């Protein structure tokens, strides 16, 4: 019987790189979107601390997550506040691969939440 592998930084919640990222020198300003797919992506990023690219594609309903993330970055988050951390893992065939993990910085999260609050307030008026 195989013994379970020790926890690694590739498991959910074990991304120390995210703690080392410093985005405080660059304020975040999110300009918003009305695209339903982009809104689902934002909801996912707000709901989870980090999202692997494959889960991002599946849960948002897209097949090109990096292009969608790029659009969100162009709306004001940039690479500084919508980050992609690359981790090294071994796939089922024993090959090294470097999947991306998407996450919002605290400032990016705050900017999106502020935009959502303004959007909701404008919709109620």
Image (cartoon, rainbow, N blue to C red):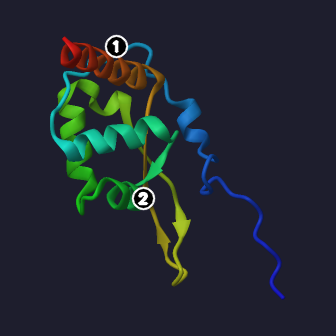
Residue 54's tag is none
* Residue 58 drawn at (x, y percent): 35, 62
Question: Which secondary structure lies at badge 1?
Answer: loop
Q: Residues within 10 Å of mark 2 (few under 14, many from 20)?
A: few
Quick check: 32 left or right of 87?
left
* Residue 8 drawn at (x, y percent): 68, 57
Pick the residue in front: 105 or 26. Answer: 105
The quadrant in which residue 108 appears is top left
* Residue 29 drawn at (x, y percent): 27, 17
Q: Residues within 10 Å of mark 1 (few under 14, many from 20)?
A: few
Up/down of 93 relative to 98, above or below:
below
Quadrant in which the N terminus appears: bottom right
- Tell me the residue at 53%/36% (across/down): 18
- Residue that label 1 marks: 27
Up/down of 74 relative to 16, above or below:
above
The quadrant in which residue 42 appears is top left
State the separation of the CA atoms marked 1 and 2: 28 Å
Quadrant in which the C terminus appears: top left
- Tell me the residue at 15%/34% (across/down): 34
Pick the residue in front: 70 or 47. Answer: 47
Residue 55's tag is 2
Total numbered circles: 2
Contact, CB < 8 Å: mark 1 with mark 2?
no
* Residue 7 drawn at (x, y percent): 73, 59
Up/down of 114 relative to 105, above or below:
above
């Amino acid at each position: 019987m195989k013994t379970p592998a020790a926890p690694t930084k590739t498991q959910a919640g074990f991304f120390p790189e995210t703690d080392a990222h410093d985005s405080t020198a660059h304020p975040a300003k999110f300009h918003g979107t009305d695209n339903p797919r982009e809104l689902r992506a934002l909801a996912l990023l707000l709901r989870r601390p980090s999202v692997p690219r494959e889960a991002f594609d599946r849960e948002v309903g897209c097949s090109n997550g990096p292009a969608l993330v790029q659009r969100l970055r162009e709306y004001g988050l940039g690479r500084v506040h919508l980050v992609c951390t690359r981790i090294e893992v071994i796939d089922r065939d024993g090959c090294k691969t470097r999947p991306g993990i998407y996450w919002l910085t605290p400032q990016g999260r705050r900017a999106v939440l502020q935009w959502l609050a303004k959007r909701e307030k404008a919709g109620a008026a």
